[in-house]
C-alpha cells in the first residue's frame, strides 16, 4: 500500500507545482496533494455533533403508520432493484434493411417523451413498415407499465396470441427505461412453432446484440 | 467582586469548549457551572440550580479557606451571569482550541506525579476511587501537549506514565502513542469525540471532598483545570467502592454512565400475544393415546395471552409503535410455534440441551455472518467474498417461484396453487445470492421467512426475497461499512449499525431510515431488537451498550463495564435482562429496568461472538473464538437481586464471584470458532462456525 500511496501523492504534488509554475516540487505542494487525496479517498465518518443534529431532526418525525394488507412492503419502484436491467432485441431479420443490419423498432417510450399515449414505432426499413402496419395488437397502458405487443413477422402468418405475453428476442434499450417501470414485451410465436431456422434467428440475435 | 469572575478565570479557562459541572445526588446542594468569560457567549452544560459553595474559580482566587459563602455564592452568580445557552456540541475547531496553552509544558510531568503521590498516600478506601482519575487525566494532558506541539515533552510524558495505567486501557494507549502531532489529531474521529465528551467518573462524596481539598490547596494547578473541563464527576452518597467493583464497571471510552442516564422508564415487558384457537391435529398426537381412547378434538385455547387480563405495567402499550398486522400466514406460524412449545424440553442444570453444530467447511476463513430462521428451517451464511448463501436445514429443498412465463400456465383455482407456483426444476439445497460488493458482515431472516437482510462493508443493507431468491432493495444510508443488522421480531422494521457510529432504524418500505440513533463514540458493532420491538440495544467499539427507544430515538440506558468492543447481545425472552459479550471474554448481565449490572460470567478466553438465551430463559449459551460453547444457569444468575432504593441510588451492586457456580458446561469444538447460536423451538441448541485449520 505505501509505495503506491507515496507515488500517488508525489505525482499529484508534481502536477500542482507545475500548475503553479514553480520550478521544483515544494513542501506546500505535497501538503496540498495529501489534503486533496485525503478528502477524496480517505473520508472519515461525519463528526459527532453533525450526527446528533441530523438524528434529532430525523427522530422528531413520528413513525409512519402501516397500511394493512398492502402486500410486500417495498419502497417505490425507483428505489428497488426489481426492474429489469436489460432489454431484448426484436427480431426483424431476413430482409436486410437500408442500414444493412437488423433494425429495432424505435419505440419512443411514452413516459420519457411525455407522450403517454400509444408509442410510435419508427421503422425505417420497408420490411418493418409492413410489420408496423400489422400492428393492430392492443397496446395497453397499465399505470406505469405498458406492454407493446408486436406480432411476429412470421411467414406462416400466425399471429401472436395476445394472451401469453412472452418476452423473447427483443432488446430493450436500457436508456429507455426511465424512472417509470416500463416493460416492453414483444409477442413472438414460440420458437418451437416457428420452423424456419429458429437457430438462425438466435444467431442473428447474437450478431446484432450491439446494434443499439 | 470583579476580580472573581475575570481575573483567574480568564487565565485559567480561556477556552471555547466545555464547562465543568459537578453534580451531586443529595437534593439540598446542587451544581455549579463555572463559565469561561473569555468568549462572548457561554457554551457548555449549565444547570439552573442553586449554587454550591465550592465554586472552583472563586475558591482559587480567595485561597483555600472556605470563606464567606456569600462571597462565593456571589462569585458563582456573577460568573454564571453570562450563561446564555446550553450547547453541547461545540464545533471541532472550538474543541481543539480547548487545549490552549495553560501551563508550562515541562511542569506537566510534575503535576501528574504530584497527583500520583497524593493518591498513593491517601487512605486505602479512597485510593481505588481516586485512581480512576489517572487515565482520563493522563490522556487529556498528553493530548494537550500534542496539540500545543510540545512533541518532545509529550513523548517523555507518555513514556513515563503510560505503564501506570490499568491494563484494560492498553489498546487505547497504543492508539494514543501513534498520535504525536497536531495533524494526527484532526483525522481521528474517536479521539475527537473523546475530547468533546466528558469522561464520567463516579466517586463517593468522601473521596471527592478529599480530592477537591487537595487540588484547591495547590496554586496554579493545571490538574484542577482539566478536571473541570473534561471530567464529569458524578457524586454518590455511600461507601467508597472497592477496586473490584470499580474494575467491573469502568473501561469504556467515556468513563462510566451518569446516574440520570439510566433513570428513564423503560417498558421492558412483552407485548400481549393475540388470543386464538389452536386446532388439534391428528397426525401430531400419535403417541398420546395408547389406550385407544377417542381423541378429543376440542380446540385448545391459547393460554399464554389470557393469563393476566390487565396490562403489565412494564409492558409498552400495544400501539406505542406501529406494528404490522398479523397475516394468516403469521397466525399459522404462531400455531406451529405453540405446538412446538408444548413439546419443548424444559432445560435446567440437570437437563442440559443437546448441541448440534453446523460446521462450514472450505470457507477459507471467509465466513463472516450466520443466521438461522426461527423455526430452524434455513441457515444463511454471509461471506467475505461478498456472497450470501442460503441452505436448507431440513430435507425440504429450497424452491423459488416460477418465472412469469410458467406462472401463467398454472391453474390458479386449484387447491395447491401455493405448491404449484414453486419451481421444482431449480430446487436445490443451496442458493447463492450475489449482489454485495464487499464482505457481508451481518445477516438476518425475517420472522415470516419471506425476506433476508444482509449488510456489508460496501455500506448498503440489501433485502433479498426468499421466494424468488433475488435482491429486492438496497438501502443506502451508511456510507461506511455496516457491521450488523437485524429484523424486528414482528418483521417490517430492521436496524443496522456501522462504522459511522450510528445505528439506523429502517422499515422495508422506506428507502431512508426512520430513526437515527447517534451517541456512540466509536463504531456500532452489534444491534439487537428487544422482544417487544420498542427498544434497540447497540453495542459499540467504545465499549458501551446503549438502549434506544424506537418511538423517539432517545438513549434510555447506557451500560459500561466491558473492556473491549462488544460483539454480541442477547435479550432474555422475558425482556427484563440483557446479556452482552465482548472481546474481553466476559459475559455481563444487565437488569434493564433498574439499569444495573447484575452479573459477570468469566470463563471464556477470547472474543464472544454468540450469545443466546434458551426459549424459556433458563439457560444462557455463549460461543466464542476460543472454540468453545459454554452454558450458564440464567435462572440462578438472575434470582435474588437485592434491588432496593439504595442500590439504585448508588448505581451499583456487589457482584458475587459466582461464575464457576453458574457455569453448567463447556463444550469444545475441534478448532472451529463459534459464530452463531440458536435454540430451536424445542430447545435444541444449534451452533454454527467455520472450520479453521490452524
Image: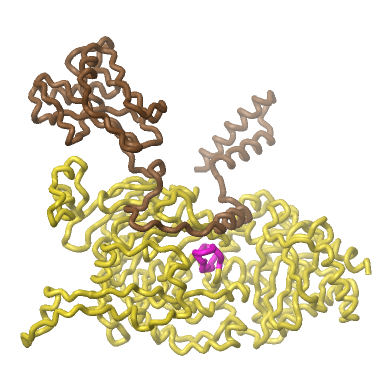
**Count of numbered tags:** 0
Describe residue B321's horizontal placement relative to residue B283 as left or right: right
x then y, percent, for residue A158 = 11, 25
- Which colour denotes chain A? brown
Chain painted yellow: B
Asked whether B186 falls inside the magenta stretch, the response is: no
Q: Nearer the viewer, residue B595 or B273?
A: B273
Is residue B673 depicted above or below B633 in this figure? above
Asked whether B554 falls inside the magenta stretch, the response is: yes
x then y, percent, for residue A47 = 61, 53
**Residue at point 81% right, 62% down?**
B36
Describe residue A141's horizontal placement relative to residue B546 as left or right: left
Q: Which residues are magenta?
A: B540-555
**Residue at point 73% right, 54% down?**
B94
Is residue B488 depicted above or below B618 in this figure? above
**Residue at point 33% right, 76% down?**
B614
Q: Nearer the viewer, residue A82 or B345?
A: A82
x then y, percent, for residue A80 = 38, 44
Amino acid at each position: 500500500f505505501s509505495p503506491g500511496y507515496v507515488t500517488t501523492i508525489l505525482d499529484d504534488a508534481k502536477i500542482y507545482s507545475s500548475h503553479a509554475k514553480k520550478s521544483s516540487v515544494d513542501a506546500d505542494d505535497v501538503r496540498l496533494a495529501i489534503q486533496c487525496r485525503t478528502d477524496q479517498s480517505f473520508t472519515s465518518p461525519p463528526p459527532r455533533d453533525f450526527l446528533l443534529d441530523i438524528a434529532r431532526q430525523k427522530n422528531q418525525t413520528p413513525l409512519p403508520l402501516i397500511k394493512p394488507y398492502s402486500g410486500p412492503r417495498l419502497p417505490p419502484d425507483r428505489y428497488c432493484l426489481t426492474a429489469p436491467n436489460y432489454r431484448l432485441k426484436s427480431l426483424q431479420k431476413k430482409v436486410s434493411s437500408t442500414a444493412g443490419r437488423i433494425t429495432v423498432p424505435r419505440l419512443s417510450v411514452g413516459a420519457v417523451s411525455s407522450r403517454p399515449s400509444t408509442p410510435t414505432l419508427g421503422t425505417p426499413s420497408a420490411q418493418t413498415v409492413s410489420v408496423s402496419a400489422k400492428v393492430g395488437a392492443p397496446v395497453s397502458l397499465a399505470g406505469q407499465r405498458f406492454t407493446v405487443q408486436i406480432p411476429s413477422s412470421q411467414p406462416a402468418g400466425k399471429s401472436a396470441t395476445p394472451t401469453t405475453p412472452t418476452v423473447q428476442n427483443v432488446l430493450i434499450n436500457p436508456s429507455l427505461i426511465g424512472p417509470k417501470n416500463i416493460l416492453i414485451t414483444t409477442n413472438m410465436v414460440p420458437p418451437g412453432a416457428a420452423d424456419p431456422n429458429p437457430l438462425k434467428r438466435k444467431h442473428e440475435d447474437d450478431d446484432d446484440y450491439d446494434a443499439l | 467582586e470583579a476580580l472573581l469572575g475575570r481575573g483567574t478565570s480568564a487565565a485559567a479557562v480561556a477556552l471555547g469548549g466545555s464547562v465543568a459541572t459537578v453534580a451531586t445526588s443529595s437534593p439540598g446542594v446542587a451544581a455549579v457551572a463555572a463559565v469561561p468569560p473569555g468568549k462572548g457567549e457561554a457554551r457548555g452544560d449549565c444547570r439552573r440550580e442553586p449554587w454550591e459553595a465550592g465554586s472552583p474559580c472563586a475558591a482559587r482566587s480567595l485561597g483555600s479557606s472556605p470563606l464567606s459563602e456569600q462571597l462565593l455564592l456571589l462569585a458563582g452568580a456573577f460568573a454564571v451571569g453570562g450563561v446564555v445557552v446550553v450547547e453541547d456540541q461545540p464545533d471541532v475547531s472550538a474543541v481543539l482550541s480547548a487545549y490552549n496553552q495553560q501551563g508550562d509544558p515541562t511542569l506537566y510531568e510534575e503535576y501528574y506525579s504530584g497527583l500520583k503521590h497524593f493518591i498513593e498516600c491517601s487512605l486505602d478506601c479512597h485510593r481505588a476511587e481516586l485512581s480512576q482519575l489517572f487515565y482520563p487525566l493522563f490522556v487529556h494532558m498528553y493530548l494537550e501537549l500534542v496539540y500545543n506541539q510540545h512533541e518532545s515533552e509529550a513523548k517523555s510524558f507518555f513514556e513515563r506514565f503510560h505503564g501506570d495505567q490499568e491494563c484494560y486501557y492498553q489498546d487505547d494507549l497504543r492508539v494514543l502513542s501513534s498520535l504525536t502531532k497536531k495533524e494526527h489529531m484532526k483525522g481521528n474521529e474517536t479521539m475527537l469525540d473523546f475530547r468533546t465528551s466528558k469522561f464520567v467518573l463516579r466517586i463517593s462524596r468522601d473521596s471527592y471532598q478529599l480530592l477537591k481539598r487537595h487540588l484547591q490547596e495547590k496554586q496554579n494547578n493545571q490538574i484542577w483545570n482539566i478536571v473541570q473541563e473534561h471530567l464529569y464527576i458524578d457524586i454518590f452518597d455511600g461507601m467508597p467502592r472497592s477496586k473490584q467493583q470499580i474494575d467491573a464497571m469502568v473501561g469504556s471510552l467515556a468513563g462510566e454512565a451518569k446516574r440520570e442516564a439510566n433513570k428513564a422508564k423503560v417498558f421492558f415487558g412483552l407485548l400481549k400475544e393475540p388470543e386464538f384457537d389452536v386446532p388439534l391435529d391428528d397426525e401430531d398426537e400419535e403417541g398420546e393415546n395408547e389406550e385407544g381412547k377417542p381423541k378429543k378434538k376440542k380446540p385448545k385455547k391459547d393460554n399464554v395471552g389470557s393469563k393476566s387480563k390487565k396490562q403489565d405495567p412494564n409492558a409498552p402499550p400495544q400501539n406505542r409503535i406501529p406494528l404490522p398486522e398479523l397475516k394468516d400466514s403469521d397466525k399459522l406460524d404462531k400455531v406451529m410455534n405453540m405446538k412446538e412449545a408444548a413439546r419443548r424440553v424444559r432445560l435446567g442444570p440437570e437437563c442440559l440441551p443437546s448441541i448440534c453444530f453446523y460446521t462450514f467447511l472450505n470457507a477459507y476463513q471467509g465466513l463472516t455472518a450466520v443466521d438461522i430462521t426461527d423455526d430452524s428451517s434455513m441457515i444463511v451464511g454471509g461471506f467475505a467474498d461478498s456472497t450470501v448463501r442460503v441452505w436448507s436445514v431440513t430435507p425440504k429443498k429450497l424452491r423459488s417461484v416460477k418465472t412469469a412465463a410458467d406462472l401463467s400456465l398454472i391453474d390458479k383455482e386449484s387447491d395447491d396453487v401455493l405448491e404449484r407456483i414453486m419451481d421444482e426444476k431449480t430446487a436445490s439445497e443451496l442458493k447463492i445470492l450475489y449482489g454485495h460488493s464487499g464482505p457481508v458482515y451481518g445477516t438476518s431472516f425475517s420472522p415470516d421467512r419471506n425476506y433476508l437482510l444482509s449488510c456489508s462493508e460496501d455500506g448498503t443493507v440489501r433485502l433479498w426475497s426468499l421466494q424468488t431468491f433475488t435482491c429486492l432493495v438496497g438501502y443506502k444510508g451508511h456510507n461506511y461499512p455496516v457491521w450488523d443488522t437485524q429484523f424486528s421480531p414482528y418483521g417490517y422494521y430492521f436496524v443496522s449499525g456501522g462504522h459511522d457510529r450510528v445505528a439506523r432504524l429502517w422499515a422495508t418500505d422506506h428507502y431512508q431510515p426512520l430513526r437515527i440513533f447517534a451517541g456512540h463514540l466509536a463504531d456500532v458493532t452489534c444491534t439487537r431488537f428487544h422482544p417487544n420491538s420498542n427498544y434497540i440495544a447497540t453495542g459499540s467499539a467504545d465499549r458501551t451498550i446503549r438502549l434506544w427507544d424506537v418511538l423517539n430515538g432517545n438513549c434510555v440506558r447506557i451500560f459500561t463495564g466491558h473492556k473491549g468492543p462488544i460483539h454480541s447481545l442477547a435479550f432474555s425472552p422475558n425482556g427484563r435482562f440483557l446479556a452482552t459479550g465482548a472481546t474481553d471474554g466476559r459475559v455481563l448481565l444487565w437488569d434493564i429496568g433498574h439499569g444495573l449490572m447484575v452479573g459477570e460470567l468469566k470463563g471464556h478466553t477470547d472474543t464472544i461472538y454468540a450469545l443466546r438465551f434458551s426459549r424459556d430463559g433458563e439457560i444462557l449459551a455463549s460461543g466464542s473464538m476460543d472454540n468453545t460453547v459454554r452454558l450458564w444457569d440464567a435462572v440462578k444468575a438472575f434470582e435474588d437481586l437485592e434491588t432496593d432504593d439504595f442500590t439504585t441510588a448508588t448505581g451499583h451492586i456487589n457482584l458475587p464471584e459466582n461464575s464457576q457456580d453458574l457455569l453448567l458446561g463447556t463444550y469444545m469444538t475441534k478448532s472451529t470458532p463459534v459464530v452463531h447460536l440458536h435454540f430451536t423451538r424445542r430447545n435444541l441448541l444449534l451452533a454454527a462456525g467455520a472450520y479453521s485449520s490452524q
